[in-house]
Amino acid sequence: MSERSLADILLGRLARLHARRVLARFLRDVERATQVQQRVLFEKLRRNAGSAYGRDHGFASIRTYDDFARQVPVSSYEDLSPYVRRVMAGETNAMFGRNQRVLMFAMSSGTTDEPKYVPVTPHFLAEYRRGWNAYGVKAISDHPATFLRPILQVSSPMDEQHAPSGVPCGAITGLMAATQKRIVRRYYVTPPCTAYIADADSRYYTIMRLAMAGDVAFMITANPATQLKLARTADANAEPLIRDIHEGTLTSRFDVPRAVRDALAPRLASAPARARALARIADSTGRLLPRDVWNLGFLANWMGGTMGLYLQDFPEYFGDVPVRDIGLLASEARMSVPIEDGTPAGVLDVTSNFFEFIPAADHESPDPPVLRAHEVEPGREYFILLTTSAGFYRYDIGDQVRVTGFQGQAPVIEFLHRGSSVSSLTGEKLTEQQAVRAVEQACGQLGLPIRTFVLAPQWAGTPFYRLHLEGGPAIAGHPLQALAREVDAQLRAANIEYACKQDSGRLGPLELNPLPERFFAEHEAGELTRRGGRQEQHKHRYLLPMPGLDAEFPIAAPQPGPEALF
């Protein structure tokens, strides 16, 4: 027995013992979730009572949940942003008590062109990681053949920007990867430096160059589109990939920074036997697919909302491999921990954050009812409110969920979609406000009058958005493609996730579809007649939240020439 094998055995035994404790603790807390939620809330209030936000809202005098609900309002990011900006400038006690520090700001798309910045403290990071640990332990326990085998996970840079105080701003996945336990990091196929390959095709190729050299146990990415892009990259680049593995190289045809190449060099050892095995697979099947190369135990990615549409393509690339949702999570918090394959539902992460719920039907009310976790009902739909160690209290993240049941005292929830004015085909979380502003600015740039429009998500091999725009004499003769490109540019500027998803090839360019003048007025009048209701109650929707809602809109025939005209 080699020294390394003995080390693996010893580490494996320790890891299994720790994993059992992590899982047992989570399941124990779920059984007494109501009590745990009370503790979690007051830990956060006590920790930050001395902050400016805590003083402004009387944290020191809060003794009960009713006090909390009375003194702390339901908040949006815009409500919290003045405090966030103070923290970004270095005034940590604007949101946090003594002896706390901010490790980074996790960035996510906001409702305007300003991203959301979420302060990540050591408490927040520990809680975020705790949810991931419970998730990972349960998934691996259910698929024991994946234990201590290579893991393909994808992260993004944690330092895309810096706050005025110098603190990095970026993706929390980058911080998670960089600070992961050594025993877990040891089995990662891709080191954190791959996140710094800016060109998407080059990044995907590099990841698969590393991954195809071994036998991956499971793949974990937030977005299922990323899983497919990785698989398609290997299939489309089988020849250079096999050659690189044979020769111990990373081809120069892809744009990989020199610093990243140098950091990856120790991982690029020549593996002629592995290359020959891959070549045999490619020769016999005509393709190079994960299903034929790896002994996959499971795939981990989002399954809820529109994300489930991607799963229909999984068997072609991955075979009959179970899929486990990674849970409802965002830069702001982890909200659920799935414990079964094949469902987007997961147990509420009651140990890390305090949760409240607004019934979906009452979400737009000026003073909606707010329920605690033990008060929700199976089969009902709600919007979720978060109180976290990021300094966010009663924060309306805009996610609509359905309660599918209970595990112990904790509700089991599944993500349905963002709010009715949000669309998220690939995780871009595009808002109606961003859509309206993008069209206004694009028309202004091109000197066009603003027309009535609808921006609609479209499902395809590469999903995209279609802008249905009323034409007419006022804009006849203006180039269609120029307007489409300008609206796309404005959407990219307004929403960092939209730009990121396009840059990575997961979201296609916007298409523009001209409609007859007054089309929307006539269409919506017909809808009102069919459904009943009064015209004064109707509100035009500029952004549709789901694919297929524009199925009745006519599609104009493409015009000849490179610049189609209205």
Image: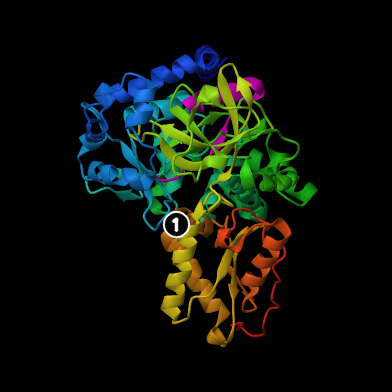
Q: Judge from the rendering whether residue 354 lies leftward or rightward of residue 472; answer left or right.
A: left
Where are the magenta residues, as a range?
Answer: 131-157
Residue at 28% in and 23% down: 47
Dividing the image into 4 quarters, which one contains the N terminus? top right
Residue at 43% in and 53% down: 111
Disc 1 residue crowd, few under 14, some 14–19, many 20+, Cα 10 Å: many
Q: Is residue 514 above or below residue 69?
A: below
Dividing the image into 4 quarters, which one contains the C terminus? bottom right
Q: Amino acid at mark 1?
A: Asn
Q: Is residue 330 above or below residue 38?
A: below
Nearest to the observer: residue 130 or residue 8: 130
Residue 144 inside the magenta-drawn segment: yes
Residue at 59% in and 31% down: 413
Could you say whether the residue bearing mark 1 is in a helix, strand or loop? Answer: loop
Q: Quadrant of residue 148?
A: top right
Q: Which residue is mark 1?
A: 495
- The percent position of residue 426, horizontal first and vertical second, equals 57, 51
Residue at 77% in and 52% down: 286
- The percent position of residue 219, horizontal first and vertical second, equals 60, 37
Q: Quadrant of residue 460?
A: bottom right
Residue 46 inside the magenta-drawn segment: no
Report if residue 270 is visible in the image.
no
Q: Is residue 249 above or below residue 135?
A: below
Q: Judge from the rendering whether residue 81 lies leftward or rightward of residue 241; answer left or right.
A: left
Report if residue 356 is visible in the image.
yes
- The percent position of residue 44, horizontal first and vertical second, equals 33, 25
Q: Is residue 377 above or below residue 430?
A: above
Nearest to the observer: residue 104 or residue 36: 36
- The percent position of residue 508, horizontal first and vertical second, equals 58, 62
Nearest to the observer: residue 449 or residue 58: 58
